[in-house]
Amino acid sequence: MATIPLHARVAILKSKTGGEKEAGIKGPMTAANHAFQSAAGFSGFTKEFEPFEVADGERTEYKAPESKPIQHTVTDVLSRARREWAEIINLQHAVDFGNKSACADLVFDGQTIASAVPVSTLVSLRNRLLDLKTLITSIPELPPGDWEFDTARGCHKWEKPRITTATRKEMVPVTKAAATATHQAVAELVSVDKPIGKWTEVQFHTGMPATQKLALLDRIGLMLEAVKIAHFTANGIDSYDSSLGTVIDRAIFG
């Protein structure tokens, strides 16, 4: 029984199915179905003209032969579909059987953090890590500045409070023209801001410091690389040929 590395057999299977198990199985069937639905391609004919005997002096009529070639035979189309169908089942069975024993240690930062992780778990783990990376990337960052962590509030606060003046609007008379010997003074009410106190504003922020965010993303990247190496190692085991599809084909067609 021939053996090749599991990752090589996976690559062969993907090349035949495009990575979709069901689509791969249906591929040969679809092609054969399309061929079978064109009934005209499975029939043909030849026609040869034979003139009747004619009396002396009459012209003998001749006609060119006619034909329509057969484009397909049922035997050929069915044989090709059966062969491809069985081959895909053989490959899928070999890959699935190999995956049952394919596993590897997960090594992160020089330490083995999990032993004999199945290849199916490694595939799922990669997807989950990509989800986590997307989540961490979207976390709001703490703006640059002088922040300190406020334990009581569980978030960062700006070290220096911002002091601003509080005001209110008041209308006060303003002289526009002084009084003269012949005219009274001219005045009007003008709105002014009158200080009434001060605001002490303390800024708070729950964002993640940029350095912490980058550190997390770096560690996720290292974990993704560790999973990639483990996946490659797990898929490096020998996988054996399968004849399951061939056996099923023979059981059905004899």
Image: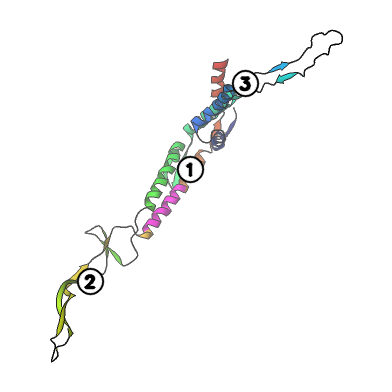
Name which of mark 1 and mark 3 comes first in the sequence: 3
The residue beneath circle 1 is: 230
| Residue at horizontal 14 percent and vertical 77 percent from the top | 172
Q: Which residues are magenta?
A: 212-224
Nearest the viewer among 244 and 239 is: 244
SS at circle 1: helix
The residue beneath circle 2 is: 163
Q: Is residue 161 above or below residue 112?
A: below
| Disc 1 + disc 3, Cβ < 8 Å | no
Q: Is residue 112 above or below residue 199?
A: above
Name the disc covering residue 211, or none: none
SS at circle 2: strand
Name which of mark 2 and mark 1 comes first in the sequence: 2
C-alpha gap between disc 1 and disc 3: 54 Å
Q: Amino acid at mark 1?
A: Ala
Residue 72 rendering spot, x and y as whole percentages: 64, 22
| Residue at horizontal 42 percent and vertical 52 percent from the top | 219
- Within 10 Å of disc 3 (Cα), the crowding (few <14, some 14-19, many 20+) is few
